[in-house]
Amino acid sequence: MRKGNMSLLLELSEELECKECAVLCEKVIYPANCFDSGCKYIYSYDQGIHTYFGCLYKVFAVEIDLDGYEELEKRKGGFGAVKVVRPPRERCQVSVERAYNREQGESCREALLRRYSTDEAEASTYSQER
């Protein structure tokens, strides 16, 4: 049973990160897109004088202070992205971004395009070939 859990964790890790080269890339989501798309899975709650929001399905695990978020959204670049920690829902708009270099080397842009294609069938086929 333990082996099955480890296998599931490895599969989940492969869905959320790319390890094709020396650059570590991760799937991220921009909370602004969640609001803009009218996502019904965004929740909020009040804690004292602060209001926090997050994703009901925990696609991103953090709960974000709404006032801080709104202040940053007014600035150039906006709030930015948060790391995807669970497989995204169908309507989620995710992207793949370079987290940091693990060692010297070139980015594997072609592998990223193959691996994180918006065409799920193509991505599924690529995963099975590995």
Image (cartoon, rainbow, N blue to C red):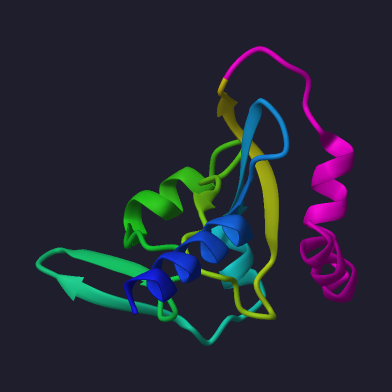
Q: Within the image, what quadrant is residue 105 found in?
A: top right
Q: Is residue 29 visible?
A: no
Image coordinates for residue 33, horizontal then vertical, percent:
63, 64
Q: Nearer the viewer, residue 113 or 50?
A: 113
Identify the residue at the far top of this view: 104
Identify the residue at the far bottom of this view: 40
For the N terminus, the quadrant is bottom left
| Count of residue discs | 0
Image coordinates for residue 11, horizontal then vertical, percent:
56, 65
For the C terminus, the quadrant is bottom right
Q: Nearer the viewer, residue 79 or 20?
A: 20
Q: Nearer the viewer, residue 98 or 14?
A: 14
Tell me: residue 49, above or below residue 28: below
Q: Within the image, what quadrant is residue 119 found in?
A: bottom right
- Magenta-colored stretch includes residue 120: yes
Tell me: residue 45, above or below residue 40: above
Image coordinates for residue 50, horizontal then vertical, percent:
20, 62
Left or right placement of residue 1 versus residue 81 in this view: left
The majority secondary structure of the magenta stretch comes to helix
User: Which residue corresponds to the image point at 87% horizontal and 75% vertical from the top-left?
Assistant: 121
User: Which residue corresponds to the image point at 70% horizontal and 53% vertical from the top-left?
Assistant: 95
- Magenta-colored stretch includes residue 77: no
Identify the residue at the far left of this view: 48
Part of the protein shown in magenta: 103-130
Image coordinates for residue 37, horizontal then vertical, percent:
67, 76
Q: Is residue 32 visible?
A: yes
Left or right placement of residue 3 versus residue 22 in this view: left
User: Which residue corresponds to the image point at 25% horizontal and 77% vertical from the top-left?
Assistant: 45
Tell me: residue 34, above or below residue 114: below
User: Which residue corresponds to the image point at 41% horizontal and 81% vertical from the top-left?
Assistant: 56
